Image (tube, rainbow, N blue to C red):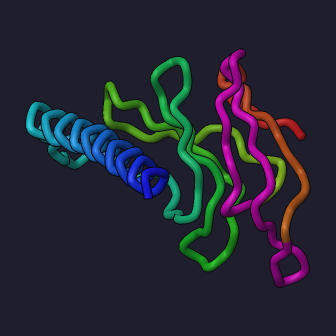
Amino acid sequence: MHHIDKKFRGSVKANWVLALFLSGLVSHALSAIAQTPGTFTTTGIMTTVRSEHTETLLTNGKVLIAGGYGYSNSIVGSAELYDPSTGTFAATGNMTTTRRFHTATLLADGRVLIVGGYGSFGGGERSLASAELYDPSTGTFTA
């Protein structure tokens, strides 16, 4: 019985520590929300209607918006840049492959690695095993 009692006290102690930890996370999150209330404001209009695209914050402060599913019910390969300082969107180079549901990762050198997703092929779609790089200094994509 002594062994079970010791085990029970240990689990109660562990649960108490976990409760305190979670309480600290919740109170931290609530204080962050209370200190920085968010607001939405209207901004410019994108150059292309799209969903299922990626957005990547670049080192120059602009946001690369690439690919996705377009207004004409097709996968798009276009890309654009959003400039938060002016609230405007501007077209940039096209991707080498049309894609949606892909990933976009900012690399240490400032380029963006675009990988995978789904592409258009012969009137249908299929998974992509390709990748490409966006270079913000030239505004171009390369396979």
Position of 89 compared to 100: left or right?
left
Q: Is residue 45 visible?
A: no
Question: Percent position (x, y) of residue 62?
Answer: 48, 28
The answer to which quarter of the image holds residue 88 is: top left
Q: Residue at x 28, y 45 (%)?
A: 16
As displayed, is residue 5 above or below residue 26?
A: below
Q: Residue at x 62, y 79 (%)?
A: 73
Question: Percent position (x, y) of residue 112?
Answer: 70, 32
Quarter of the N terminus within the rendering: bottom left
Residue that sits furthest to the front in the current view = 1
Q: Residue at x 19, y 48 (%)?
A: 40
The answer to which quarter of the image holds residue 26 is: top left
Quarter of the C terminus within the rendering: top right
Q: Please state which of residues 51 and 25 is positioned toward the viewer in this rendering.
A: 25
Please tell me whether residue 123 belongs to the stretch shown in magenta.
yes
Question: Percent position (x, y) of residue 55?
Answer: 54, 44
Please tell me whether residue 94 belongs to the stretch shown in magenta.
no
Question: Percent position (x, y) of residue 15?
Answer: 34, 49
Position of 99 compared to 82: left or right?
right
As displayed, is residue 44 above or below residue 126?
A: above
Q: How many marks?
A: 0
Residue that sits furthest to the bottom in the current view = 123
Q: Is residue 128 visible?
A: yes
Q: Residue at x 32, y 29 (%)?
A: 86
Q: Which residues are magenta?
A: 99-126
